[in-house]
Image (cartoon, coloured by chain):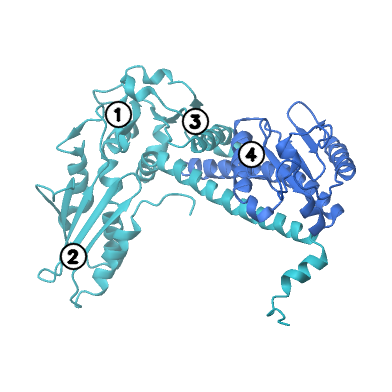
Chain colours: A blue, B cyan
Amino acid sequence: MANTIRLYLTCIRNTLEAAMCLQNFPCQEVERHNKPEVELNTSPGLIMNPVLICRNEAEKCLIETSINSIRISMKVKQADELENILAKKFLRFLSMRAEAFQVLRRKPVQGYDISFLITNYHCEEMHKHKLIDFIVQFMEDIDKEISELKLSVNTRGRLVATEFLKQFI
Amino acid sequence: MILLQSPSRFLLQILHDRLLSQDKGVDIDCQTVEFDDVRYHIQVSMRNPKVLVLSVALPLPPEEAASFDGLPFGAIEAIKAAYGPVVQILDPPKDGFDLTLKINLAKLPSDEEQKNAILLQIASIREVVLGAPLKILLKNLSMKTVGPEAGQPVALVHRPNESFFVVPQADKATVVYPMRFLDSIDIVLATSFLQEFVEARRTAALNNAPACMWSQSPPPELKGAPESALTANAGFVTFVVNPRHVEGKKLDRTVWNLLTFHAYVSYHVKCSEGFMHTRMRRRVDTLIQALDRAKSDAEKLKKMVTGPSFKK
């Protein structure tokens, strides 16, 4: 079970390396506009086939590419009620700071927990392989953070309970 | 500070300051609010520098919790027993408050240790007044007697418009708390905390602590209780208190711990949320640093150079 995370992330990394070939493409419909084509979804000639990578039923990653932008959506594992609210809280926290992250999308795509939108401008500003490193590290960090938050809640609960019950002895 | 302390720091500070600065003439008129809607108002005027007037407001009791003249059952006797001649109850209490006391600093015992003990007791006025009915029930338990309410759940106030229940019996007292929280995140965190209570009790070191159970639906002990009290979104916690837990010196501590159980859990839920926020902010900073590493050096150089632009 622990090994599948490596395979999952390697698969995502390889797909991103293949898919992240973005070039500047001015909008075909409106003059002097330059929009991320993956968001508009108008012309089939500009969009490539979306790739869905599933680790299991609960965790998956959707990568949609177009000529000038790529959209990566993730669904995070949520085993029980506590993990559910921790994940929701944490991802909402991140999404609200999307401005600081530049490549993060403010609202996740329908059916997923968090989404990234990378445009050709980002690729021009940043090294492509470092950008992919960042995305993969982000995914790992989310998983780690949620399990650490859950552990801290359980540890605190145990400590609080022990201190309280010790009072009666 | 993991446990909630019985003496109120606000009152203790003012009492000590007053004792230290008895000759300096400064009027005091302070109000404060503590958790669960308990308000204090303390006044000293320079006309009687040895007299403090302390008014206390208590949380609004729900219908099922009996109260005589706005004070919990047995509160007046408890005050007289705890403070003796130092404190006098003023009737009627000040407007907006449930109890007003006149504290006479001149009547404090001269022995330093006894004086500090009485001041500590005065600062614990909340435990004395709100905990009075619970103390009577638990005192009966320690003497292995039962009052007229044996076997029936007795409703006691611990939060505004909410009560918890005590079922007194000859050999044990069962205390049931319906746990209610407003926020949905609080509910999930509190449920996980309360289940830890049950788990922690099972460890060998805590064998002598009161037995602890948690259930989503009202436990059978609450059969005689009114309907409105039986809804709780974070379940019901049951403690079984034995005479061993309330003998001698342990009685006061047990009363305080049981009285403020809900406040204790709520306090730690909020601390937990605060801690999570701090962690999340730290994680966001780490991720943004990682993103910065991805930026090419040319871009970074462009951003760093902010001098005046050329004019040809």
The chain to which mark 1 is attached is B
Q: Earlier in the sequence, mark 1 or mark 3?
A: 1
Looking at the picture, does residue A117 appear above or below residue A100?
above
SS for callout 2: helix
Q: Is residue A168 visible?
A: no
Residue under the point 61% across and 38% down: A88
SS for callout 1: strand
- Residue B212: numbered disc: 3
* Residue A17 place in picture, x, y as percent: 88, 45
- The amino acid type found where label 3 is placed reads Cys
Residue under the point 53% across and 44% down: A160
* Residue B41 place in picture, x, y as percent: 22, 56
* Residue A76 place in picture, x, y as percent: 71, 36
Q: Earlier in the sequence, mark 3 or mark 2?
A: 2
For disc 1, the marked residue is B155
- Residue B105: numbered disc: 2
The chain to which mark 3 is attached is B
Foreground pick, A25 / B60: A25
Which quadrant holds residue B173? Answer: top left
**Disc number lying in front (2 or 4):** 4
Foreground pick, B201 / B176: B176
Give how far apart the Cα atoms at labels 3 and 2 are: 43 Å
Q: Residues within 10 Å of mark 2 (few under 14, many from 20)?
A: some
SS for callout 4: helix
- Residue A139: numbered disc: none
Q: Earlier in the sequence, mark 2 or mark 1?
A: 2
Dividing the image into 4 quarters, which one contains the C terminus of chain B?
bottom right
Give how far apart the Cα atoms at labels 1 and 3 are: 19 Å
For disc 4, the marked residue is A87
